[in-house]
Image (spheres, rainbow, N blue to C red):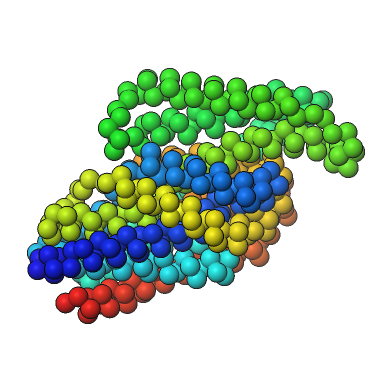
Amino acid sequence: MDTIAMYGTVFITLAVVFGFYMTWGIGANDVANVMGTSVGSGAITVTTAIIIAGIFEFLGAALAGGNVTKTIRKGIIDPSSIVDKPEILVFGMLAALLAAAVWLMIASIRGWPVSTTHSIVGAVVGFAMAGIGIDAVNWGKIGQIAASWVVSPLLGGTIAFILMMSIRRLILNTDNPFLSAKRWGPFYVFLVGFIISLVTMFKGLKHLNLELSAPMSFLLAAVIGVVVAVIGWIMIQRVKVDETADRDYHFASVEKVFVPMMIFTACGMAFAHGSNDVANGVGPMAAVYAIVQSGGEVAQKAALPLWILLLGGFGIIVGLATYGYKVMRTIGTKITELTPTRGFCATMAAAATVVLASRTGMPVSTTHIAVGAVMGVGLARGIGALDLRVIGGIFVSWIVTLPIGGLLAALFFFTLKGIFT
């Protein structure tokens, strides 16, 4: 308790600095993966991706980021055995933030698309094993999270595959694919608006004290979906047939219809990512803030100040703008060849999977989901459309993330403990 009273301001300052560093890493690595499908398909430029992500990551974090932060902050470890030594948890959360941030920076410099969720969960577990004991880790919760890492890419890939096959049946394999694309396009845009707004209202707005009944949520989501679809319809109607391009590639004009639709899915994916992955950076920061503010009380539940969510959203934007271009290439161009139709399916499927995860409070990996969705789109054309060597390299980078995060966190934990006690 004396340590908390003596160094409380220092701990909050370190939490803010490390939390910002961590969310910078999320922007540089994870958000780059998220926007990679849109950029890789040629639908939007890197600059447009940064602007879209800047607005919608921030909104997702601020409006719908409150639910997942609880899973990262509590549930992974049981702090009951250190109730009389709250400084141990403070050191641990600071160490976890710094460890995950350092690993994300290394991965981003190398251009590896690693999981920020893996990084922070591995780091929290590493600190708990080093600082409290192996029994302090909630292995059941870790098992659930680990299962979600397998389920989420499969779910993302399956949804992307189904969407791709529906586009093939309703649009590409018809007598006039261009007219079919203009007819069905607004429906696909409606799905984007409906799914993302529905899940946001279901779960994300509680920390803003906005409670809506299920029927009201469905109605409002449908209205938002229709508004988005109307805007999409107006944009799609402006697209004209490009006969010169169609001679080289039969579906060139159809792909042009999907370019404005990709803008909506990019916005949706950025919002979904902000609502889910901001937790990785602000969860441990919120835990440190709550302990210091309460004078050393280790509570299982703590209110999440809005300024912490906003700081997390801002850090993500800075990370993407300054370093995101390096990692965008991997997911956007190297796994499989993407066109606007394929990019739309991959991004839409990934967004739907991420918001479903946010709905249940499960901190899934957006990187895994995005890669799974891109693979699902590639599989719709056959296994030969995938670059298995690149996919193998991505899987290896995923495997090493957990142990590296844990080892770094243990190292930083003992360093902080040595400095302040």
- Location of the N terminus by quadrant is bottom left
Describe residue 65's horizontal placement relative to residue 269 as left or right.
left
Residue at 41% x, 65% y is: 101
Q: Is residue 396 visible?
A: no
Q: Position of residue 72 (x, y in %)?
A: 32, 54
Quadrant occupied by the C terminus:
bottom left
Q: Quadrant of residue 179?
A: top right
Q: Position of residue 24 (x, y in %)?
A: 45, 59
Residue 202 sits in which quadrant?
top left
Residue 7 x, y percent position in the rendering: 18, 68
Residue at the spot x=58%, y=36% of the render?
A: 264
Where residue 95 appears, as percent x and y from the top left, is: 31, 69
Task: Pick whichever, 213 or 133, lies toward us.
Answer: 213
Q: Report the side of 373 relative to 210 (left or right).
A: right
How many labels sit on residues? 0
Note whether residue 224 is visible: yes
Direction from residue 52 to residue 237 in the image, left or right? right
Which residue appears at 19% of the width and 51% of the height? 300
Above or below 83: residue 371: above
Q: Residue at x 37, y 69 (%)?
A: 99
Is residue 291 shown above or below 152? below
Residue nearer the viewer, 136 or 283 = 283
